[in-house]
Amino acid sequence: MNISILGSTGSIGVQSLDVCRMHGYNVVCLTANTNVEKMESQIREFHPALACLMDEKAAAQLKTRVADTPVKIVSGMEGLVECASYDGADTVLNSVVGMIGLIPTLEAIKAKKTIALANKETLVAGGSIVTRLAAENGVSILPVDSEHSAIFQALQGSPGKKAVKKLILTASGGPFFGKSIGELEAVTPQDALKHPNWNMGAKITIDSATMMNKGLEFIEAKWLFDMPGDAIDIVIHRESVVHSAVVYRDNSVIAQLGVPDMRIPIQYALTYPERLESPVKELSLSDYGRLTFFEPDYKTFKCINVCKKAIELGGVHPAAANGANEESVRLFLGGKIKFTDIAYLNEEAMKNAPDIKNPDLNDVLEADRNAREYVISNYGK
């Protein structure tokens, strides 16, 4: 198998390379943002044909440092797209963070690559465009997120979509489970970055703390599995052992369980429909003793409601919610706004989006841009 990994120096990218290393997969393209040192190390180990750094200055440094290798160094969105559509790749694993992942996903689909998708924003912002294009090109989109992979795995025994009653997305609840809004007013970025179960990048860890990540996953699930919003439930599960579940018409519930390690869903996306030996340890239920489940606190963690409303309104509203969130999280990490401001800004920017029933890519990109500008211009008010 020949794989292009977009976002290879991030948490998901590094764990994806663990899987490739174990099974001897051929990595033909690597991309990252600015991390010259880590990219050089990856190039020297995996010998890709192409490597891209989004930052042009970083790409120039990388080119000098790996001049003794045959790898071609590219940069910017043009380089990212070149890696996403590279002729020698069978599968494109997209693990870049943020809205920047949408265009390379679309280009990979046009090039008829199998998509292993870890970039939430692809489906959150451009769900209708992406799924339609994938259907037109006969391209499979295989989920890498642990929750969507769990649902995908639980659906393998389904006799058809009519057999499915609803989906259950589980959520860890993040570091602030059980806290009130008042208790969250003064939390710092350092507090929010302490996730109880998962080791992730800063942006997605903050999204977990606000529970925006579960709202984004709610939108993703709608597009991945073609399910209405009222057939998708969210349940807090602190131990992160039950990764999600499917409820069938006969009220049987099929769930996927495992230790909280992203290499399981990453590997399944790459090996599907096969199951191979994994670098992840076996789950011992007796070690856990008990598993707990709770209803989400929608009054405190309002970001979930923002996403539910966005999918109800449709059009570019999900793209606006996502774009606003990226800016809000950036401002919070920079100490510019309070933790509780994130949900407020996301909601206001989402409600401010225009009502466009059948958006095209330009509509989505404009809604994203306008939502970011809204947050930046209103965060101090």
Image (cartoon, grey):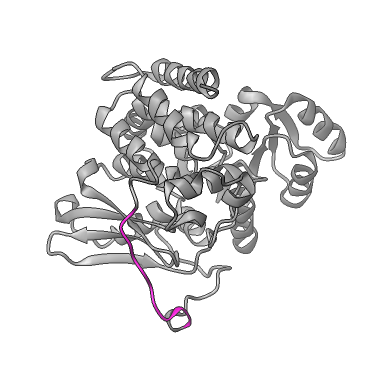
Residue nearer the viewer, 127 or 191: 191
Residue at left offset 38%, top offset 73%: 291
- Looking at the picture, does residue 290 appear above or below residue 270? below
Residue at left offset 42%, top offset 79%: 285
Residue 26 in magenta stretch: no
- Looking at the picture, does residue 4 appear above or below residue 86? below
- Left or right: residue 232 versus residue 17 is left
Residue 291 appears in the picture as rendered = yes
Residue at left offset 30%, top offset 24%: 315
Q: Position of residue 123 (x, y in %)?
A: 40, 35
- Left or right: residue 231 versus residue 128 is left
Dominant secondary-structure state across the stretch colored magenta? loop
Q: Position of residue 336 (x, y in %)?
A: 62, 31
Q: Position of residue 98 (x, y in %)?
A: 53, 34
Residue 86 appears in the picture as rendered = no
**Quadrant in which residue 57 is drawn:** top right
Q: Which residues are magenta?
A: 287-296
Tag count in the figure? Answer: 0
- Looking at the picture, does residue 93 appear above or below residue 348? below
- Left or right: residue 263 versus residue 350 is right
Q: Position of residue 2 (x, y in %)?
A: 57, 47
Residue 291 in magenta stretch: yes
- Left or right: residue 134 versus residue 107 is left
Residue nearer the viewer, 49 or 148: 148
